[in-house]
Image (cartoon, helix red, strand yellow):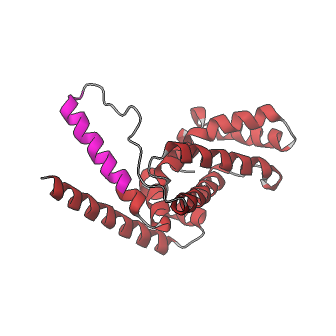
Amino acid sequence: MSMAALEAIPDGDAERSGELMARAKRGDAAAFEELMRRYERMVLRTALRMLGGRREEAEDASQTVFLKMHGSLGRFREGEDVAPWLYRTTVNACRDAGRKARRRREVGLEPAAGARDGGVGPEAAAEKERLREIVREGLARLPEKERAAVVLRDVEGMETREVAGILGTTEATVRSQVRSGRRKIREFAERLLRKRT
């Protein structure tokens, strides 16, 4: 399990998540709600990054993920790590949301909510937020497969092997997608910064 996935579990208590999953499979609604609380930040954070910061769409995608998880409880094996399944399902839910958004011709990104750095001057904080926005916009412009690979590898900090398993592809393909995605984001940022100066 990646560090990002472990951060989603209070005190790194993966064993407790396994117990909760076993109880949820037996129909314990409280256990399922606790599982949701343990993973909701991880799922929402990934969805926000996949969907370019569009919070409403990310929240809808997150709800879809947990509805699918509930419907799939019977398929989870004893002791199975749920995080890779959640990442894969989140990526797929975001792909679906992105296709729907394109069909409705929705365009644009929301600014990050309340992004402020304590102790940093207003000019430095504003510049930092501009750079974050450029990266978010660059991510949003990537093809879906490259965006998923970059988000899982670079943003979520997963190993290439984990990303390949979640996306159902090879490690070589993931490395190629990440390399291409990084290059495109860098080129996009450089173009934008040149226009501003």
Furthest toward the front, the residue is 104
Position in image of residue 117 (x %, y %): 31, 30
Furthest toward the right, the residue is 26
Magenta highlight range: 120-137
In the picture, measured across the screen, residue 6 lies left or right of residue 176, that is right
At 54% across and 43% down in the image, what residue appears? 56
In the picture, measured across the screen, residue 171 lies left or right of residue 25, that is left
Which of 37/158 is in front?
37
Position in image of residue 76 (x %, y %): 77, 53
At 48% across and 74% down in the image, what residue appears? 173
Furthest toward the left, the residue is 197
84 lies above or below 121: below
Which of 158/129 is in front?
129
**Residue 163: in magenta span:** no
In the picture, measured across the screen, residue 186 lies left or right of residue 34, that is left
Q: Quadrant of residue 176?
A: bottom left
At 61% across and 39% down in the image, what residue appears? 40
33 lies above or below 110: above
Q: Main secondary structure of the magenta part?
A: helix
**Residue 127: in magenta span:** yes
Position in image of residue 9 (x %, y %): 60, 37
53 lies above or below 116: below
182 lies above or below 126: below
At 53% across and 39% down in the image, what residue appears? 7
Which of 36/62 is in front?
62
